[in-house]
Image (spheres, rainbow, N blue to C red):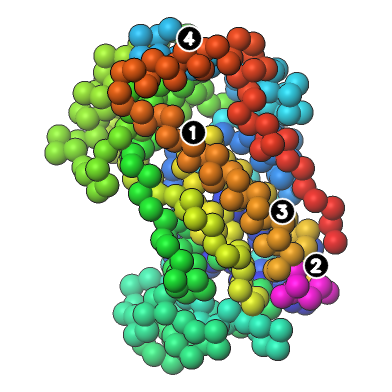
Amino acid sequence: MPHALVLGAGIGGLAAAVALGDRGWSVTVLERAPVLEPVGAGIGVAPNGLRALDALGLGDAVRARRSWDGAGGLRTPSGRWLARTTQDAAAERFGDPIVLLTRSALVELLRSRLPDGVTLRTGVRATVTDPGADDRRAAVGLAPVDAPVDAPEDGVSADGAEGTAGGAGVPETLGADLVVAADGIHSATRRALFPAHPAPRYAGFTTWRFVTETPAGRFAPHETWGRGRIWGTQPLPDGRVYAYASAVAPAGHRAPGGERELLGRLFGRWHAPLPELIGALPEASVIRTDVHHMTDPLPAHHRGRTVLLGDAAHAMAPNIGQGGNQALEDAVVLGRFAGPSDDVVAAAAAYTAERLPRTTAVVRRAARAARMTTLTSVPACLLRNTALAAAARTPQAALRAMDGIADWRPPPRT
């Protein structure tokens, strides 16, 4: 039985483990964190993500968590609606709705779906020491997270000459027929495979995310656009609210008075229920993240027997809600091409050929959407809002921005 190592137990890594396990692979998932705690608050599973989850046997379980059946849309800080849409409109246009749920719920569904041949190891630092080739397996060095590192974490050569096993930092080496690196935006594996490629660059804004209790009274799901700032408030299946915000800010800046105090200054005078949500927000529940993206695509999403998946391959701005959905697509496509008896190097190349053009287009579309939300001049924002209102006179029109993305379907299995 062929063996795969998956680096990272996030949404993309777990989905890849399910997809490969279903194809007859033995899989070991290696996670740096000591326990499996998903980073982030909520996630919108778009129609393309639902179809990827269908391929993993989880689509209906996620659809059952749908909590939004009414109208929602895009607003201004005063509360005026710029565009309206409904879940029915999304389902009519793309064949499925958009389902909001917590990341922890999706991670738990994926974890519960892991086939018998999948093993999860936590609390280990995994470093690709040889990406593999036609004539040799790939190799990954392991060390406890708190162990010292002898070799550079991201310094490997094509033949594994650096970072090999034997030092105090890498006491164990595992061989693999396939390595799936789902190790995030700042992927050490990506730096090792493509050391000359530009790193993800700062997109010019930071984000806040949190899950909190539902405020008193009813409200329609919405995203609100201001000058260089946006806010989104979305209901979750368990009755709580997933909220997110972004604002133009210097990279690395942090609020001296705390994130809740800063959110109050930035959004506290916007329409209801924002002031109430912010006022009741525990400081510890706020997740703040500077946004980095890769608008310069990699030359490939693989090298030898090692493939990159999710943010490691195509980090993108969150403005069209596709980061997790594209990782799910990656996992399913990899599973379709990497059968247990297939030529692994050829399957990795087919994975790149299928995913690189699509993810490049999605990353660039997300970057364009980000530029729209980071406009700060009054005239530019007025022109933007007028154009949005004119272009979204019907619920279907408001969804056109997702054409070519949300209508994706998995390729046939090889």
Furthest-left residue in this view:
256
Marks 4/1: CA–CA distance: 19 Å
Label 2 near label 4: C-beta < 8 Å?
A: no
Q: Which residue is mark 1?
A: 369
Looking at the rendered structure, the kind of residue marked 2 is Gly
Residue 90 lies in the magenta-colored region: no
Residue 399 in sight here: yes
Q: Residues within 10 Å of mark 3 (few under 14, many from 20)?
A: many
Where residue 226 sits in the image (x, y, percent)? Answer: 35, 20
Residue 345 lies in the magenta-colored region: yes
Where residue 260 sits in the image (x, y, percent)? Answer: 25, 30
Q: Residue at x 77, y 47 (%)?
A: 410
Marks 4/3: CA–CA distance: 37 Å
Q: Mark 1 or mark 2, which is nearer to you?
A: 1
Marks 2/3: CA–CA distance: 12 Å
Tell me if residue 100 comes above or below residue 106 in the rendering: above
Q: Is residue 18 left or right of residue 139?
A: right
Q: Is residue 53 left or right of residue 363?
A: right
Q: Which residue is mark 4?
A: 81
Marks 4/2: CA–CA distance: 49 Å
Q: Mark 4 or mark 2, which is nearer to you?
A: 4
Q: Which residue is mark 3?
A: 332
Where residue 301 sits in the image (x, y, percent)? Answer: 60, 64
Where residue 159 sits in the image (x, y, percent)? Answer: 55, 88
Write the start and end of the magenta stretch as one range: 341-347
Position of the N terminus by quadrant: bottom right
Q: Earlier in the sequence, mark 4 or mark 3?
A: 4
Choose between 257 and 325: the one closer to the eye: 325
Q: Quadrant of residue 63?
A: top right
Q: Which residue is mark 2?
A: 339
